[in-house]
């Protein structure tokens, strides 16, 4: 398939929110799809997304899905497995591919595998987001330059369907990495899910009465704790084994500091902070990082 | 003393870095002092601060301190008690006041009390800072609008010296609060020191190899972990009892989440995140907060 033409004549996006809307906009502007059908539970919201120009067409029944060459499932993480299965079922007997945008991969793949043994589903996790939600904040520039992790069932084997889905995400400007679901879930537990839980735990200890003594350290360390409890408790539950391991490691690091502090082993405490500081500076000083002021 | 004239003819700043330099600049621009003597261990740095216009004069010996009506000790937190005692000794028999800018108060006050029983020292903690250090980044606008906590030894009794020192910090544009050293150290453990330790613990778990999968959640939650290990291990050690209590509470909150997750009590986990989210939103939505994008 030539990169100059559209990769798909038509794709469908299930769940037209911030991510789904951004994928819809990017797919059209990057030539990954000629047209985008939006699919969602709320007809009014879907009609509004259409009139905002985020999607070309609002699906009225699951029959509309069979016209799509690719279906991208962008619903909340605890609904993805069900929606992927619905998409696969609605397109049974076709060559329509299905991918998703869920931030946990193992539990979704296991739930899908229980009822589907074909090769049309290729799981994905585009690492992009924003404090905002809703298609009104959708933006074609949310994705380019960011990583998208694919966790194909047969990894490290890569078949044609995986290649096609890979090409789709790359066409949106994303840098694609392939890994196993286990590696994905362990990595994201440490880089995303555990930081969120730590931020929430710190925020839970600071009573409103003393908030006026909080400064930029509190502000940044706890920022993500303001996020949606529904979404994050679902993520933690879906990534349970890795989160349990991560919490144990975090508690162990804190206990190690507690003992050093209690026994006045200042060298050990300073050494711990030094290691953490060096690790964090590697992130900050990485020239490929798009954000600055970090 | 009329607010239109200068409060002090001359003040001295010990430790002319980011905070000391900002106090020097603000004191002159707000009319808190007509002139500022800088005092420090490194003569070259002090001469440079003078040629940058941050201070009017570089002290050459501790005799110069006796010309100051107020001495503000802005040295690193683990040197403050020693420097406060040196300042009190150099000005023995005068009415020169001494204040400081340390972010821990109890251990400093206890160390001073061991060798000094007079009433010329009034401890302070201006809640202001920046990622930068050094007088080159000093800025008169770092302090206005921020809180400054005074922890006078006789609190809640407030004598004339406390009033004078209070007036000085207010003259710099700061909003002054008075409290006991215990209340200060407990409050700051939760709003500042514990967030820093949590950020460091999270950062310590994320190996360089997976840093490319870190996104804005990691970035903000761990930002302060890049800070100076020397400074922060000193702060933790000086605030040991409150830090030990704080770590125990943080570990207990994390264990509570771990148990809820392990036993699949989703309602409890969501409830915990909900509480943390509401606490954090109170900070974000406070209209008096100077920073936005929080």
Image (cartoon, coloured by chain):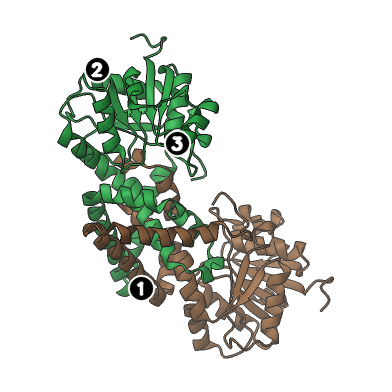
Chain colours: A brown, B green
Q: Residue at x 40, y 36 (%)?
A: B41
Residue under pointer 2: B94
Residue B103 picture location, percent across and down: 33, 40
- B44 left or right of B85 in image: right
Residue under pointer 3: B17
The answer to whether one can see residue A198 in this image is no
Q: Earlier in the sequence, mark 2 or mark 3?
A: 3
Out of B134 and A290, give the one closest to the viewer.
B134
B189 in relation to B123, above or below: below
Circles 1 and 2, Cβ within 8 Å, touching? The answer is: no
- B131 left or right of B267 in image: right
Residue under pointer 1: A244
Out of A278 and B221, give the one closest to the viewer.
A278
The residue mark sitting in front, 1 or 2, is 2
A194 in relation to B151, above or below: below
Q: Residue at x 33, y 23 (%)?
A: B65
Element marked by disc 1 = helix
Q: Chain of mark 1?
A: A
- B149 left or right of B173 in image: left
The answer to whether one can see residue B284 in this image is yes
Circles 2 and 3, Cβ within 8 Å, touching? The answer is: no
Q: CA distance from mark 1 to mark 2?
A: 62 Å
Residue B201 picture location, percent across and down: 38, 61
Q: Chain of mark 2?
A: B
Out of B218 and A64, give the one closest to the viewer.
B218
Quarter of the image for residue A253 reads bottom left
Q: CA distance from mark 2 to mark 3?
A: 27 Å
Element marked by disc 3 = loop
């Amino acid at each position: 398939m030539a990169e100059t033409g559209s990769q798909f004549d038509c794709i469908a996006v299930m769940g037209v929110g911030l991510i789904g809307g951004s994928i819809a906009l990017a797919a059209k502007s990057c030539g990954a799809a000629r047209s985008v059908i939006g699919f969602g539970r709320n007809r009014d919201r879907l009609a509004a997304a259409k009139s905002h120009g985020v999607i070309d067409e609002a699906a009225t029944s699951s029959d509309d899905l069979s016209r799509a060459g690719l279906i991208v499932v962008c619903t909340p993480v605890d609904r993805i497995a069900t929606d992927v299965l619905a998409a696969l079922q609605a397109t049974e007997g076709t060559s329509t591919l299905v991918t998703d945008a869920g931030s946990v991969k193992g539990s979704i793949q296991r739930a899908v595998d229980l009822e589907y043994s074909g090769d049309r589903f290729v799981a994905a996790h585009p690492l992009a987001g924003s404090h905002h939600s809703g298609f009104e904040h959708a933006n074609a520039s949310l994705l380019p330059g960011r990583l998208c992790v694919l966790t194909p069932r047969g990894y490290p084997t890569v078949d044609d369907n995986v290649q096609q889905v890979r090409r789709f995400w790359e066409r949106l400007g994303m840098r694609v990495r392939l890994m196993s679901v286990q590696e994905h879930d362990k990595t994201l537990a440490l880089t995303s899910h555990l930081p969120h839980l730590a931020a929430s735990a710190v925020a839970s200890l600071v009573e409103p009465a003393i908030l006026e003594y909080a400064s930029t350290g509190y502000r940044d360390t706890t920022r993500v704790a303001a996020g949606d409890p529904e979404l994050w408790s679902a993520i933690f539950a879906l990534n349970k084994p890795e989160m349990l391991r991560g919490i144990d490691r975090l508690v162990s690091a804190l206990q190690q500091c507690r003992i050093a502090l209690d026994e006045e082993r200042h060298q050990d405490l300073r050494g711990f902070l030094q290691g953490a500081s060096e690790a964090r500076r590697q992130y900050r000083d990485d020239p490929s990082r798009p954000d600055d002021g970090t």
